[in-house]
Amino acid sequence: MSARFIIACIALNLLASTPSFGAVDNQKGEPKAVQTKGDQVPPVTILSIIPAQGEPGMSVTLSGSGFSDKTTAFLGNTEVQAEVLGPKQLTFEIPQLPPGLYALFVKRGDGTTSRAYNFTLMAPKPIVDALAPDTVYACAANRDREVVVSGRNFQEKSQVLFDGAAITSRFLSPDTFSFTVPRVAAGLHHIQVKNAGDTISGAQGLFVDARPEIESIVTGEEFVNYYNLVIEGRNFQQDSVLIVTEERNLEQAGLQPAYEVKRLRSGTASATERERVIYANCTQLIYQRHPYSTTPKNFRVQVVSPGGEESSVVQVSAP
């Protein structure tokens, strides 16, 4: 074996046993530094949004991962303070913002943000809590037909709906509206408030009471052969009927006492008597009574409206 062959073998063995110091930079001929894998910061993710739309004041819960104590929520450019319930859940209250479509995302204290999701912010729905008063008399004057609507989320351009139709109303505050009850048929009617964007409140009942009621009967002016009985009350109408039930003593004819019933309509006289009823206004009727004796008698009086509503029966003692 030649000396040259022996030297070549020794050189190959030395190269095989030399330790590696990394890859060599082709440009500089220097070894590259080997990168080590350190601790990675977890990303911020949103997995669920409940609810996916809402009104100002509502609570929204986000579930996901990577939340920290300093995580806040954003609706568009508006930062919203959130209550972090843990690394996987947080909640926030929707602020007072105009309705529309907003980008919802969260931002951690280290500046990491989540992906943005669409969130629909709806106009706050008006709510009607009460009507004052909730009963209006059919024949009341306009000043006594004023109703105040109490609730919340009212707007200056809101409308009061009376049985589904818009009527003239007055905005007093975000909590109150007022309106004058129109001249409508007696019975139960429904009141609602409608905001811009066609959001409508639930209905409250308003009762228009047409039942006549007698509050007092007093003697009025006296004339030669008749006098006035002034009947005070409410819900009297021009064509109301006054029913007078009077006992007639028929003992002289050998008969038992009997009752005579007179039905007197305003502006007309009885077919058998000169008595009549004069309509003064919706709170007063005048009964022109022609007594055949000055001795007081007991009789009953009742007012019946054209729709059939009846007042209570009132006992009267007069000539």
Image (cartoon, helix red, strand yellow):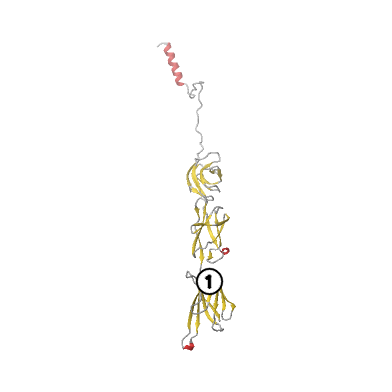
User: Percent position (x, y) of residue 140?
Assistant: 55, 66
- Residue 276 in sight: yes
At label 1, which amino acid type do we have?
A: Glu
Classify residue 258 as left or right of residue 284: left
Quadrant in the picture for the C terminus: bottom right
Residue farthest right in this picture: 221
Q: Secondary structure at mark 1?
A: strand
Q: Is residue 225 above or below residue 78?
A: below
- Residue 90 in sight: no
Q: Is residue 210 above or below residue 82?
A: below
User: Percent position (x, y) of residue 63?
Assistant: 49, 45
Residue at 50% from the left image edge and 82% from the top image edge = 247
Per the image, the residue denoted by label 1 is 213
Exactly how many numbered labels are in the figure?
1
Tell which of 76 and 307 is nearer to you. Answer: 307
Q: Is residue 288 above or below residue 167?
A: below
Tell which of 240 and 297 is nearer to you. Answer: 240
User: Percent position (x, y) of residue 268?
Assistant: 51, 74
Residue at 55% from the left image edge and 77% from the top image edge = 288
Tell which of 266 and 71 is nearer to you. Answer: 266
The crowd level at tag 1 (other Cα within 10 Å; few <14, some 14-19, many 20+) is many
Residue at 49% from the left image edge and 48% from the top image edge = 53
User: Percent position (x, y) of residue 167?
Assistant: 52, 57
Quadrant in the picture for the N terminus: top left
